[in-house]
Each structure stands twice: as structure tokens, then as C-alpha cells.
Image (cartoon, rainbow, N blue to C red):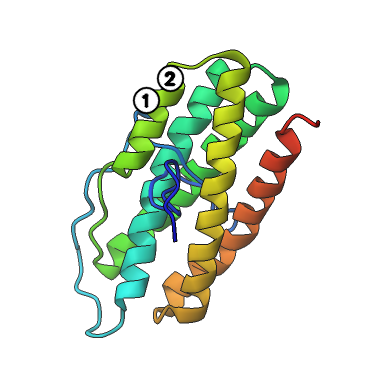
Amino acid sequence: MQRHPYLLALSAAAVLAAAGAACGAGGAQPSGVTASPTISPTASPAPGRLSEQDRTWLADIHQANLAEVEAGGLAQKKGATKAVRDAGRKLATDHTHLDRKVVATARRLGVSLPSTPAPADTNAADRMRNESGKTFDQDFLSTMISGHEGAIAKTKKQISQGSSPEVVALAKQTLPHLQDHLAMLRKAQPSG
């Protein structure tokens, strides 16, 4: 699967909601939002309770959330259209909420999480920081759509192949929000 520079197929972000999940873009956080430090285990998980699939999905969705919060902040400031600015606001809010749930779940299960978005997501955010107007909007929407498609695929895989009931439940709560975000982003694209 090709990794997209913003979600890296759900590899870089900061939060939607386990009851309202989200999507991603890399780099610095918008004002008032900070990247979570690497999460250290506070309790040992039951042996064999988490599969590599579970651990990978938690790390990927966390990085995707960090990236989405960053991209959302950029869209709120730089979006040329109201639809892009509104999409950015929703992504930043939703992914912040989701990431809180991801971090709490990882902590409970003793899973260490990366402290920054994936490098490709950081590069995409850096690129978008230098864009404006229609160019920014087109890049933002294209990057977010591709990223959400990848995040949806990874989340469906977690639902079908994950071993931890808690992580699978979080993925099930996340999926509808990712799908809603994808629909919103597609709708924000200019027609024609």
C-alpha cells in the first residue's frame, strides 16, 4: 500500500474520538495543542494480549492524529474557502479528541507511542506552510482525502485482525468518523 504524505496511511495525527474518530497531517501543533511525549508503559499488559497489529494501529493512529491536528490548524489559518477552513477546524477538534482516547488506551495497555508525526506527514505540513490560496486548498484536500482513505483501510484491518478487544472497540468507534471526514473533504473539493 502506498503511504500518503499526510496520514501515511494513518501514520501521523492528533485526534477525533473513539466515539468520533479522525484523520492527519504532520508537523507542529496549532496553538494550544502539544504533541504527546512518548508514552511509557505504566502497567504491564497481560502476556499475549496485544498483537503486533494492535500495537501498530495504535502507533499509526496516534501519528495520524498528530498530523491531522497540524493540517487542520493550517487549514483554519490558510484556507482560501470557508469549506476548507471549516474542514480544518473539524479535523483539528476531532483528532484532538480521538488522540486523547488513543493515548489513554495505549497507556493502559503498556504501549509506547511515537512523540511526533511520521516524517512524510511533517514534510507535507512543511510544504503546505509555503502554499496559499487555491494551491493550498487543493493540496490540503488532496492530502487529507488520500490520508483518510489510508486510515480507513488500516482501521478496517484493525477491526478484522486485531486481537485486543479494547483496541478493536476503539477502531470500531473511530471508523465512522474517518468515513464522515472523508465525505466532508470530498464535498469541500471545488466542482468542475
Amino acid at the residue labelled 2:
Arg
**Of the numbered discs in the image, which one, if any, rests on residue 164?**
none
Number of labelled discs?
2
* Residue visible at 55% across and 17% down in the picture: 78
Please provide percent x and percent y for residue 190.
Answer: 75, 29
- Viewer can see residue 70: yes
Residue 121, placed above or below residue 56: above
Residue beneath disc 2: 129
Q: Is residue 13 left or right of residue 149?
A: left
Residue 45, placed above or below residue 20: below
Please provide percent x and percent y for residue 142.
Answer: 58, 37
Residue beneath disc 1: 126
Say few, some or many: other residues with alpha carbon within 10 Å of mark 2 (under 14 / 14 to 19 / 20 or more): some
Most foreground residue, 161 or 107:
161
Amino acid at the residue labelled 1:
Asp
In which quadrant of the rendered image does the N terminus lie? Answer: bottom left
Element under label 2? Answer: helix
Q: Is residue 91 left or right of residue 10?
A: right
Residue 102, placed above or below residue 182: below
* Residue visible at 32% across and 45% down in the picture: 118
Most foreground residue, 173 or 191:
191
Q: CA distance from mark 1 to mark 2?
A: 5 Å
Most foreground residue, 28 or 2:
2
* Residue visible at 49% across and 72% down in the picture: 157
Please provide percent x and percent y for residue 76.
Answer: 57, 22
- Viewer can see residue 32: no
Element under label 1? Answer: helix
Is there CB contact under 8 Å for labels 1 and 2? yes
In which quadrant of the rendered image does the C terminus lie? Answer: top right
